[in-house]
Image (cartoon, rainbow, N blue to C red):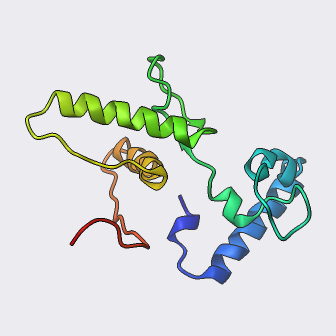
Amino acid sequence: MFYDRLVDDADRAWLFTYVRDVVNAQMNTDFDSLFAHLSQGHVTSGPPGHVTEDQLRSLVFCDFADRKVEARHYAEVRDVEQLRHVVENYLDEFNSNNKKPMDLVLFRSVSVCVCFLRQVYVIQAGCLVFTCKGAYGAT
């Protein structure tokens, strides 16, 4: 919730390095081992098993991925494709219960954005300015 607010690549790189150092030093655990699952299947320019800043950005948490449980706890989303299906199911449910359905195309980044939106939505008096780097949709 902090990294994405930085606007300068140098600041984001500094924060990533700082978090890596703190995890290694203060938590007595190897950062790359802790997040090894994020680097699986990715080709990087660094040493094998070295988790990059880009890979860490794919780390997503949400509390709605498992519809079967009543007590919602934040858990890591390890399968974004499964998350997309869950979000599609919620959208289908919404559309079947409303007079004005939302015809949306849900791709990976939209599903991840829903996780961020949900985090703000559950905070009492939560506020959000949501911007997008790319141009999506029709004009």
Q: Is residue 43 left or right of residue 134?
A: right
Q: Quadrant of residue 86?
A: top left
Residue 22, relative to residue 35: is it above or below?
below
Quadrant holding the C terminus: bottom left
Report the residue at 80% width, 65% height from top: 44
Q: Residue 136: image x %, image y %? A: 34, 67
Report the residue at 46% width, 17% height from top: 68
Q: Is residue 81 left or right of residue 38?
A: left
Observer able to see residue 62: no
Between 19 and 68, the one lying in front of the other is 68
Q: Residue 131: image x %, image y %? A: 37, 69
Between 74 and 124, the one lying in front of the other is 74
Total marks shown come to 0
Observer able to see residue 57: yes
Between 125 and 38, the one lying in front of the other is 38
Q: Is residue 3 left or right of residue 108?
A: right
Q: Quadrant of residue 135?
A: bottom left
Residue 61, relative to residue 10: is it above or below?
above
Q: Residue 99: image x %, image y %? A: 8, 35
Report the residue at 53% width, 35% height from top: 82
Report the residue at 41% width, 52% height from top: 110
Residue 72, relative to residue 116: is it above or below?
above
